[in-house]
Amino acid sequence: MRLSVDLKNCYGISELVHEFDFTNSNGYAIYAPNGFMKTSFSKAFDDFSKGRETKDLIFPNRASHKVIKDDAGIDIAADSVFVVEPYNADFASENTSLLLVNSEVKKRYDYALKEIADKQSALVLKLKQLSGLTGRTITVETEILKCFGKKSLAELVDSLEEQVNAGTPSQLSSVVYAEVFNDKTVGLLDSGSIKHQLEEYIQQYNELVSNSDVLSKQFNHYGASTVNKQLKDNGFFEAKHTVNLRTKDGMKEVTTADQLAEKIEEERKKILTDKDLATKFDAIDKKIQNTELRKFRDYLFDNQHILPYLKDFKNLQKELWIAYLVDQKDLYSQFLDAYRTSKVTIEEAVGQAKSERTEWEAVVDSFNKRFSVPFKMIVANQDDVILKGSQPSISFKFRDGDGESDVARESLLKVLSQGERRSLYILNILFEIETRRKKGAVTILVIDDIADSFDYKNKYAIIEYLKDIFSSGKFMCLFLSHNFDFYRSISGRLNLNWSCKLHATKTGRKLKLVQEKYQNNPFDYWKNNITTPAYCISAIPFVRNLAEFCGHKDEFLKLTSLLHVKDDTDTLTLDELCAIYKKILADKQQLALTPPAKFVIDVIHEEAESVLNQQEEAIELEGKIVLSIAIRLLAERHMIRTINNAVFIKAIKKNQTIKLLQEYKRLGLGRLEDVSVLEQVNLMTPENIHLNSFMYEPILDLGIAHLKALYAEVKLLP
């Protein structure tokens, strides 16, 4: 895969065009000093990944251009790009839950839920039809649960088993719940404003029933109709059986279902058309004449047989639901069986999910082995994350050696060190990276200075993680750093090809990414090309340190004379320098530096002028060392000349530059601007021309433009 990048006026990048070839390597390391391009590059990619516009914030009128394509000329998918900032306290992966998923457990759990849901849906559909509750505001589920005071339909169905199984089909199942009960009617019934009228109606109704030839209070027309239906459905009359009704005129034999139905209907009409009962209904009717209750009144007029039930309307609500369930006993039983069977599976799945060791924990364990932090992360709702797809609820425990305590994330961040906060951030980054690896899609990973310059404790842990990511084959990595030591370490640990180790250079406002010249070891490069003037001069501090370490005192002092102004600084020749190099560098016995009689100081100044006149802001180490040496020599020469005290100068044995500056300032010499320049010299050059544990990192991380400007200023000192 190839990645073509074309950026113009994107934050601090005026122009950058480059093609990254991932055919033979999964990553590139890019070194760029602060202020060159690193943050702007990563922000442009971050904008691309989030569909945001990129622009030049300082010069917003400049047209911005951002193209990121593959080798086929097709735009890279935005979600295939992930940018890791140096630090973002608020970052949290949105995909962490993927690391908590156990597909087998969730599969069983989902199947059990589906079994319940399917059977529940079938039953609810029928209950909707019977109850008339087909709207979205008041649903079958909300209404039936409110009536019985339960939290779930499955729980309710389980609790009603005895009543439903013992129940027989009833004409109550033909009553439409929605016609009788709504906010207005329930308010009316609950207020008691028609209580007296209902009681009178019920008293008259019961009296008529008790005087009926066929019906009674215990055997009303609902019960009689139910008995007739069961006899008919079970072939009672077809088997030539008969029913004897006890009437005022004696026993009356009924031989068919139709005869029995006719007799029941006759008795029903006789009761409901009774003049006194009609008067009682009219009294109720007058109480519910307003427009909002007219539909309720009309339904009661056509179904006066339900009026006796309205005295205890809350019980009627329950009886209607039970009547519906009895009417749909098959669907009810299927739902109940599915619930009870699946409930066991669900409980087992929840138990397993709570105790499950997940990929999330594997990431945390790996993190804890590599990083030393005083906190522990826990997913408080692991079962819900695995089974229900809930977002993880992360909690923290802080440990201090004597115990541990729960702590909120905000409080934790206040007590952690900067390195520990960065570690927590890195852990969240790892969750995101691990989820992307689990998904299997290739990700373009842009990592912007994730390791702190001086955090040696965690730097190599970070590099090991990056090595794992690089080796997985699922990430095309661009490692950006302004820290040469980190850049060098990541390049070495990942064994990157020469072509994959890049340095940023700038000519005017145009940026380029070029292959690194040194391949991790500038000293070998200089030694192998030591006849080249720039490398010959750059090697002086390195060889001087070797001479000091190896006990070659005379050679050490002569090389010191090329870094500090001494009596012999202006007279040392290339031939003398060549002899020193031969003595210290055992494999350079055939070395010849020409012309041998040329003074080394002249070569230093010539090379410094050459670097000064270069248009390209390159970051090669040798140019910066040459400038640093020339700057220091010019500054010391000015101070020695101005102090004009040979005894004081002769007495300086070490730290010559700073001691000269201290005396210069003590004597009040020079102009304020001269002192300012000399302080910059002391600030910028001491470490730059001495081999140290940072392997010249300070000078590499310093833009050459600063050294050029300082060199030009030092040249102007009187």
Image (cartoon, grey):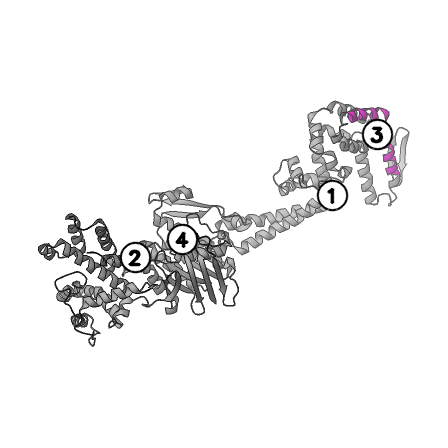
Front position in the image: 89 or 17 = 17
Q: Is residue 430 visible?
A: yes
Residue depth check, mark 4 versus mark 2: number of the one nearer the observer:
2
Residue depth check, mark 1 versus mark 2: number of the one nearer the observer:
2
Residue depth check, mark 1 versus mark 3: number of the one nearer the observer:
1
The circle drawn on residue 714 is none
Residue depth check, mark 2 versus mark 3: number of the one nearer the observer:
2
Answer yes or no: do the residues labelled 4 and 2 have beta carbons within 8 Å? no
Label 1: which residue? 129
Type of amino acid at the residue the image marks with label 2: His
Type of amino acid at the residue the image marks with label 1: Gln
From the viewer's perspective, is 312 left or right of 494? right
The circle drawn on residue 706 is 2
Q: Which residues are magenta?
A: 259-286
> Percent position (x, y) of residue 74?
53, 64
> Percent position (x, y) of residue 712?
26, 59
Residue depth check, mark 4 versus mark 3: number of the one nearer the observer:
4
Label 4: which residue? 426
Inter-mark Cα distance, 2 to 3: 107 Å
